[in-house]
Image (spheres, rainbow, N blue to C red):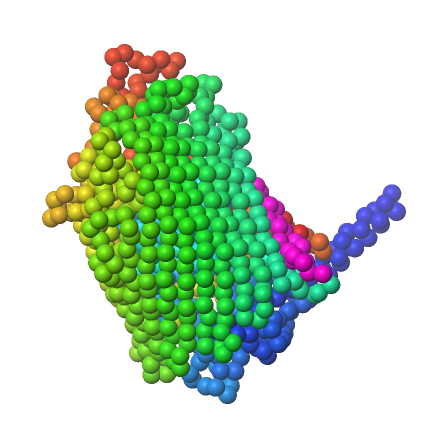
């Protein structure tokens, strides 16, 4: 017995010793803004003696690092010091960390640390811009590693009604006013079960394991982006490991994901010129819902890949792809429940396929004066959307939409550095192909449509700093046109924008921007035909939005800042529904087809308010973002003088996300969101009863009633372990830990008795819903 105990004790001591000897490493490269590698830059971990210098190719490697969270700092003579905050080092699966240094005008013969890694923004967009690292995204509580849900917590972004969808409702703008770019390639659909004509949906399809960082701009958009009215969400992907094969497996509350990466054609070289990164995700919500008896069956797959090849010192190409396979159906529960029966009656059947892929070539000029980027891409959405009179037996079609959208795009961008000037210019062109077969018995509309056309745009932007970088000035413009709409030309969409940023006192900056932005209406509007087979919307105008933003920013130190911004957005030529007489800004935030109807681009809108934000990057084991936004959001119908509140005009938004790093790789994080009383569109009971299970809204009563305030607190606890051949992260989440009711408009279903039999004569009954439950979940991430 003593021998067995001795062996057990020795085994425990041995395992503990082995764990103590586990180390990780960090690697990456350092370049300047032109893409030229920097030799001899110092890279070190804050608070340690660990560090390295970059080699001839700008690469660095720091080995034998105790796993944990660090701030990684890079400095070099004549350049501003830069920091990556909250870098997590693991025994396996630590991604590369690359730096792009900016030249400093303050000194050229010493390391410049005066800017000491302040939380900075691009000079072209000095305000209304937020960036998040992959680490911050992966540890956001309540997000289930969903990149878009994380973006919903950023300042000025309203939660969707009920808080369950990924609609980005930014500073009072509509859900379809944001554009999305993945490594510089536009990706229209980034959500599963997305709303056609908009982009929101309940689940994001971008894998967080691919992400290097995410940037959300809520104003002052770069001239290279076409079609944004309220936001630009940019996803920057990392490259695969060029030394060896590794991957990770993640399982969470709703899905499982496998990601693999490594070198290709490496041979006997230490590093390969070609790398790959590939993943697949599979939902299992449909199985969970079946077990607990819910009528929904959301079933989805998605895939993502990136192949990067370094041709030589000056040329790189990358091939990226993203796609999904979605199937949303319903099945009657075994036992009658009034709420589930109403959901069963009214739920649509959705079958979607999305695919986006692009080839990008980046060429750096040998004289170090700049670079150019050329991308060719294609994205396709296939959407089959059906509502049945009898969903249980899938009979009696009352609405069906069988549509395909396809875009093929060419984009060229040139960036030149001429003395202290930065010039960006280029063009984009695309071929669009749209087809749709629609049966809409409720509105008595049946049509088949096919359209195709070209769209093209030109853009340019110049940026320069004055007075030793105290004053930054950026001016740009773009023009767009297409071969489909009849009332527009390339000069009618001239959209200038100007940004200024002035450091009037050390650590104090005054920022301002003014700009005009245009958006072509979605294909659902352009391709709509009436029963006479006429394209009634071919005379639509581009929607226009003018932005005016003024902000004050103060830096408390290298890792914390506070800012106050005032904004005013003015809309014109907004599409208005001829059928409902309401701005389409008030539609598109649910399971529907946005814009497949007769519209007139006569609407106006305005959104204005102020936003206060405090941000703390990882310091003394704490990090967080707090924001308060006060705003008004109003749009008109055909009466251009009668402004009605939008359905997200909550007036008040509060958000906080933060975390604390504990000892032994424990971490606790929390997210809180608040929205004030929000208007909603009441149900037209008589029309709904006559057309049931279609729910008809009474848009004439928009603004008469409001929902209760939205308030939700989420909590997450992470624990990480590091072993020789793998690292392990286990996290526990609890959404809505305070058990607060989530406000939603009253739902109605047919009045039924306790057995589920419809009570005659037919009438509607309000459905009692329970939404105040705490939702716990657990997740596991294994890197190998």
Q: Give coordinates of residue 738: x percent, y percent.
A: 41, 42
Q: Is residue 157 left or right of residue 244?
A: left
Can you say whether 376 is above or below 345 in the image? Answer: below
Vertical placement of 670 versus 612: above or below? above
Counting labels gives: 0
Residue 556 sits in quarter: bottom left
Residue located 42% across and 83% down the image: 105
Name which residue lies at 45% across and 73% down: 370
Q: Position of residue 269 (x, y in %)?
A: 71, 65
- Name the residue nearer the viewer: 756 or 218: 218
Residue 517 visible in the displayed image: no
For residue 116: magenta? no
Q: Residue furthest top?
A: 760
Q: Is residue 265 magenta?
A: yes
**Residue 504 makes an appearance in the image:** yes
Q: Identify which residue is drawn at 38% across, 33% down.
A: 402
**Left or right for 84, reference 442:** right
Residue in the picture at 25% in, 59% down: 490
Q: Is residue 733 left or right of residue 723?
A: left
x%, y% of residue 61? 64, 69
Q: Nearer the viewer, residue 182 or 299?
A: 182
Q: Quadrant of residue 373?
A: bottom left
Q: Name the image quarter holding the N terminus.
A: top right
**Residue 94 place in picture, x, y as percent:** 61, 59
Tell which of 127 and 320 is nearer to you.
320
Region of the chain picked out in magenta, as a range: 244-267
Q: Is residue 658 left or right of residue 680?
A: right
């Amino acid at each position: 017995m003593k021998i067995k105990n001795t062996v057990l004790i020795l085994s425990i001591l041995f395992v503990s010793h082995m764990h103590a000897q586990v180390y990780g490493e960090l690697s990456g490269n350092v370049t300047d803004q032109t893409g030229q590698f920097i030799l001899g830059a110092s890279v070190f971990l804050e608070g340690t003696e660990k560090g390295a210098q970059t080699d001839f190719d700008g690469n660095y490697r720091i080995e034998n690092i105790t796993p944990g969270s660090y701030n990684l700092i890079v400095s070099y003579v004549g350049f501003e010091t830069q920091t990556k905050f909250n870098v997590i080092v693991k025994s396996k699966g630590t991604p590369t960390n690359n730096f792009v240094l900016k030249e400093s005008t303050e000194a050229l013969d010493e390391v410049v640390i005066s800017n000491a890694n302040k939380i900075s923004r691009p000079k072209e967009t000095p305000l209304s811009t937020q960036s998040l690292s992959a680490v911050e995204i992966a540890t956001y509580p309540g997000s289930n590693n969903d990149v878009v849900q994380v973006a919903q917590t950023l300042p000025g972004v309203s939660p969707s009604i009920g808080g369950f969808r990924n609609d980005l409702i930014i500073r009072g703008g509509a859900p379809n006013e944001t554009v999305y770019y993945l490594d510089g390639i536009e990706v229209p659909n980034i959500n599963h079960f997305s709303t056609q004509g908009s982009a929101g949906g309940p689940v994001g399809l971008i894998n967080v394991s691919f992400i290097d960082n995410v940037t959300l701009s809520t104003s002052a958009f770069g001239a290279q982006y076409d079609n944004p009215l309220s936001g630009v969400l940019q996803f920057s992907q990392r490259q695969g490991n060029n030394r060896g094969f590794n991957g990770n497996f993640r399982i969470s509350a709703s899905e499982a994901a496998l990601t693999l990466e490594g070198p290709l054609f490496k041979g006997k070289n230490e590093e390969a010129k070609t790398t790959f990164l590939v993943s697949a995700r599979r939902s299992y919500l449909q199985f969970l819902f079946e077990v607990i008896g819910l009528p929904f069956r959301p079933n989805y797959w998605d895939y993502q890949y990136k192949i990067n090849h370094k041709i030589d010192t000056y040329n790189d190409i990358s091939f990226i792809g993203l796609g999904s396979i979605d199937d949303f159906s319903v099945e009657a529960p075994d036992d009658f429940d009034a709420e589930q029966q109403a959901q069963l009656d009214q739920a649509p059947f959705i079958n979607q396929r999305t695919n986006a892929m692009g080839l990008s070539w980046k060429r750096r000029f040998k004289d170090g004066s700049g670079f150019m980027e050329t991308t060719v891409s294609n994205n396709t959405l296939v959407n089959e959307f059906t509502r049945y009179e009898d969903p249980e037996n899938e009979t009696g079609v009352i609405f069906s939409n069988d549509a395909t959208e396809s875009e093929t795009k060419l984009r060229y961008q040139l960036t030149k550095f001429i003395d202290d000037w930065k010039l960006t210019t280029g063009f984009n062109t695309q071929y669009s192909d749209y087809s749709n077969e629609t049966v809409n018995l409720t509105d008595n509309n049946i049509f088949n449509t096919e359209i195709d056309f070209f769209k093209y745009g030109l853009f340019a932007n110049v940026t320069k700093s004055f007075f030793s970088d105290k004053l930054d000035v950026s001016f740009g413009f773009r023009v767009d046109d297409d071969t489909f709409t009849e009332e527009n030309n390339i000069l009618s969409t001239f959209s200038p924008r100007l940004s200024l940023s002035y450091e009037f006192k050390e650590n104090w900056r005054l920022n301002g921007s003014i700009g005009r932005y245009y958006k072509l209406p979605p294909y659902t509007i352009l391709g709509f035909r009436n029963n006479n087979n006429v394209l009634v919307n071919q005379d639509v105008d581009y929607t226009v939005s003018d932005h005016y933003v003024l902000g004050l920013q103060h830096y408390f130190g290298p890792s914390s800042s506070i800012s106050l911004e005032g904004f005013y957005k003015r809309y014109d030529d907004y599409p208005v529904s001829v059928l409902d007489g309401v701005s389409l800004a008030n539609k598109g935030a649910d399971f529907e087809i946005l814009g497949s109807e007769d519209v007139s681009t006569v609407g106006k809108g305005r959104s204005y308010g102020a936003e206060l934000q405090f941000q703390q990057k990882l310091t003394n084991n704490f990090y967080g973002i707090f924001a308060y936004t006060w705003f008004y959001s109003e749009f008109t119908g055909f009466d251009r003088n009668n402004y009605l509140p939008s359905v997200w005009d909550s007036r008040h938004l509060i958000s906080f996300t933060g975390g604390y790093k504990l000892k032994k790789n424990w971490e606790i994080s929390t997210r809180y969101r608040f929205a004030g009383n929000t208007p909603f569109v009441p149900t037209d009971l008589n029309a709904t009863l006559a057309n049931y299970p279609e729910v008809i809204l009474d848009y004439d009563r928009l603004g008469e009633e409001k929902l209760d305030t939205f308030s939700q607190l989420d909590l997450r606890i992470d624990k990480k372990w590091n072993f020789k051949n793998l690292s392990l992260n286990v996290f526990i989440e609890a959404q809505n830990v305070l058990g607060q009711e989530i406000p939603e408009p009253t739902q109605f279903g047919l009045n039924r008795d306790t057995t589920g039999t419809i009570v005659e004569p037919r009438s509607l009954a309000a459905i009692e819903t329970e939404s105040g439950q705490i939702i716990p979940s657990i997740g596991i991430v294994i890197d190998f």
